[in-house]
Image (cartoon, rainbow, N blue to C red):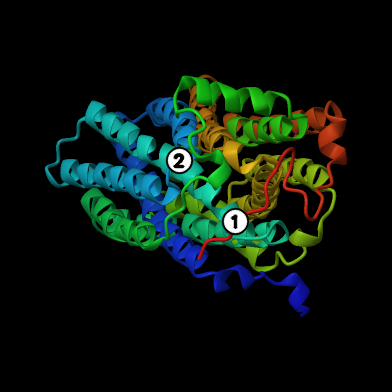
């Protein structure tokens, strides 16, 4: 098979990126274990998909507040120090989840509180990590780096839920949270080993990371239709079609229980990993905006058809198709952002990106949970996928700038800077 079709691993030659890649990938595996264990524990405590959906709101509020603020901080201070501090906060929250499970407290409000704390750490670390990558590479190398990152993240999305299913079937929640706690220490090591990544010399002393700085970033985003619409279509993809809040209920009522819930949570990651392994073509796509819209439409249709299945393996296979399409759309969204926004705005725009990418699925959880109460879990699942496919096509037709978008190979965006490579 032609090497041009296979995953491009050249970015791993950069030692700073390699450490970041390993740390995030390993820790994200643990994070995914917790992402399965928490909704399963909440469903066991309440017996309701509604409360599983409420977890989305509990995550969303700190993601919005601290995602935007964390991005502003990342534009004004050493990004390595900020990544280390925010990762430590996420780890502390995981320790708290482990403690409540060991003590068998079974308090819904406490779980919600700790999940909010965990979301706060994630909300700051995610835009910081995203703003670091363009400082490590030339513009034309960024798509390959993003594809590697997303492929490893999706491998974690695959491996984490499978591990969670095995752990929860054989042991208990304490084992799941304890495994996450151990794996997340790799991210702390990786952040500690990164070199200093301060603001560029011509950006030193530009204001402070307060409300005005956040508003400046939002104003910049509002004037850039390509960036703005790339966020809108992502909200449609995740906020409308994401079915994961329904997985615990349907795993029990339709697919026979047991390890089915782990396979459902892992299925999207299965497709994304396979898509990433054969992603060499992604860096050669010029019509990135059109490809983004098409990938999200495929994601929505795959989710809708998966929701019609009564065979677990058919549902997993179709969700895997959706996962491959989601990886393609994720790479294009991130690449458009990182090559379009100038470095002094990149942290803030990454903050908005974090709110959209991490908050969108939480809105999807809430939507799915509310519809499941009124119309049933199966209807909620299928409706979300179909609505996503229709809405994203309409959004693309309403935004010719996005559909026509072709990035310049050496153009990082309006008033952009060449990346100052850090090793």
**Depth check: 79 or 70 in front?**
79
SS class, disc 1 = loop
Query: Which quadrant does the N terminus fall into?
Result: bottom right
At which x and y percent is residue 393?
A: 81, 33
**Which residue sits at x=77%, y=73%?**
4
> Which mark is first along the chain, 2 or 1?
2
**Residue visible at 32% across and 56% down?**
188
3D distance between C-alphas at marks 1 and 2: 54 Å
Q: Is residue 343 visible?
A: yes
> In the rendering, at what x and y percent does residue 308 appear?
64, 41
- Residue 420 tag number: 1
Q: What percent of the width, then of the height, locates residue 242?
A: 57, 37
Q: Is residue 184 left or right of residue 394?
A: left
Answer whether residue 242 is visible to the viewer in this image.
no
Q: Residue at x 73, y 59 (%)?
A: 140
Q: Is residue 340 above or below residue 372?
A: below
Which residue of the protein is positioned furthest toward the bottom in this rendering? 1
Front tag of 1 and 2: 1
| Left or right of 100, for residue 127 | right
Q: Is residue 223 left or right of residue 92?
A: right
Disc number placed over residue 253 in the picture, else none: 2
């Amino acid at each position: 098979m032609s090497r041009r079709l296979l995953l491009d691993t050249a970015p791993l030659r950069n030692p700073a990126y390699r450490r970041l890649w390993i740390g995030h990938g390993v820790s994200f595996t643990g994070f995914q274990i917790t992402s399965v264990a928490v909704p399963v524990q909440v469903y066991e405590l309440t017996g309701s998909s509604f409360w599983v959906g409420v977890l989305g709101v509990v995550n969303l509020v700190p993601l919005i507040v601290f995602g935007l603020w964390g991005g502003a901080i990342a534009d004004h201070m050493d990004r390595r120090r900020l990544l280390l501090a925010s990762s430590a906060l996420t780890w502390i929250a995981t320790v708290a989840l482990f403690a409540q499970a060991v003590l068998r407290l079974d308090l819904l409000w406490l779980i919600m509180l700790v999940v909010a704390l965990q979301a706060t750490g994630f909300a700051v670390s995610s835009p910081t990590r995203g703003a670091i990558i363009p400082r490590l590479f030339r513009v034309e190398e960024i798509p390959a780096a993003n594809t590697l990152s997303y492929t490893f993240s999706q491998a974690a999305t695959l491996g984490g839920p499978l591990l969670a299913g095995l752990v929860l079937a054989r042991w208990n929640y304490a084992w799941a949270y304890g495994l996450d706690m151990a794996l997340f220490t790799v991210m702390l090591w990786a952040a500690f080993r990164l070199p200093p990544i301060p603001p560029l010399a011509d950006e030193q002393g530009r204001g402070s990371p307060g409300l005005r700085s956040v508003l400046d970033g939002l104003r910049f985003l509002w004037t850039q239709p390509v960036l703005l619409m790339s966020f809108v279509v992502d909200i449609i993809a995740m906020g409308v079609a994401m079915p994961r809040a329904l997985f615990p209920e349907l795993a029990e009522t339709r697919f026979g229980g047991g390890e089915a819930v782990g396979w459902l949570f892992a299925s999207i990651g299965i497709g994304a990993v396979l898509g990433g392994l054969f992603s060499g073509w992604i860096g050669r796509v010029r019509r990135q905006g059109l490809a983004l819209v098409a990938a999200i439409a495929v994601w929505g249709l795959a989710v809708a058809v998966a929701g019609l299945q009564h065979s677990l393996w058919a549902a997993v296979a179709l969700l895997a198709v959706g996962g491959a399409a989601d990886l393609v759309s994720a790479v294009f969204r991130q690449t458009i952002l990182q090559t379009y926004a100038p470095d002094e705005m990149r942290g803030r725009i990454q903050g908005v990106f974090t709110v959209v990418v991490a908050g969108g699925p939480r809105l999807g959880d809430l939507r799915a949970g509310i519809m499941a109460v009124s119309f049933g879990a199966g209807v909620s699942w299928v409706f979300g996928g179909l609505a996503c496919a229709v809405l994203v096509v309409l959004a693309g037709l309403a935004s010719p700038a996005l559909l026509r978008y072709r990035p310049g190979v050496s153009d990082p965006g309006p008033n952009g800077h060449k990346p100052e490579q850090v090793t």
